[in-house]
Image (cartoon, grey):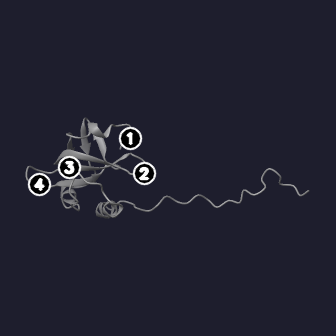
Amino acid sequence: MQTDIDPRNLIGRKAFDRKGAKIGTIDEVYLDDATGVPEWAAIRTGLFSRDAFVPLEPSELVDGTLRVPFERALIKDAPDFGVGRHLSPDQELQLYHHYGLDTSAPPPFPDHDFGNLANTEDP
C-alpha cells in the first residue's frame, strides 16, 4: 500500500474485496509498533456486524476506496479482536495466518569478519 497516505484519511472510506464486492467502511487504522506505518484496517462490515481486520500491505487505495485482495467471505471470517484496543503480536500473527501472509523475519545480514581491513598486509 502507499506509505505516504495519512492513516486518518483512510477512516470513513469504503472498502471492496478483490471481486469488487463491498466489504464495508474503514472504522480504524492500526499502525505498526516499530515503524509507525499503517498495517491493519478495521472495516465495519454492516449495521449490526463487527469490524473485520484486513492487512493494508497488499491492499491498494484506488479512486478513494480501499481494494483488499481477498474474498469477502475470508475477510468476514477473520479473527475478531474488537476495535479500539492495541493488537498484540500474537493477535497480529493470527491475522497473518488467517490471510496466508508471510510472517517470516527478513533474512539476517551476512556474517562478515571485517577484522583488519585497513591493514591487510602482514608487518
Of all residues, the one furthest to the front in this rendering is 85
> What residue would you read off at disc 1?
3
**Mark 4 and mark 3: span between their CA atoms?**
10 Å
- Label 1, residues with CA under 10 Å away: few <14, some 14-19, many ≥20: few
Disc 4 target residue:
49
Residue 37, compared with residue 106, is above or below; it is above
The three-letter amino acid code for the residue at tag 2 is Ala
Q: Which residue is mark 3?
A: 43
Q: Residue at x 33, y 37 (%)?
A: 6
Q: Position of residue 25 (x, y in %)?
A: 18, 44
Q: Residue at x 8, y 49 (%)?
A: 47
Q: Secondary structure at mark 3?
A: strand
Q: Is residue 68 left or right of residue 117?
A: left
Identify the mark nearer the N-term, 2 or 3. 2
Name the quarter where the C terminus is drawn: bottom right
- Single out the mark in the foreground, 4 or 2: 2
Q: Amino acid at mark 3?
A: Ile
Q: SS of the residue at dot 4? A: loop
Mark 1: amino acid: Thr
Decide if residue 9 is on the left or right side of residue 112.
Answer: left
Q: Which numbered mark, 2 or 3, is in the foreground of this view?
A: 2
Q: Is residue 62 visible?
A: no
* Mark 2, residue position: 34
The alpha-carbon separation of the residues under discs 1 and 2 comes to 15 Å
Horizontal placement of 45 versus 54: left or right?
A: left
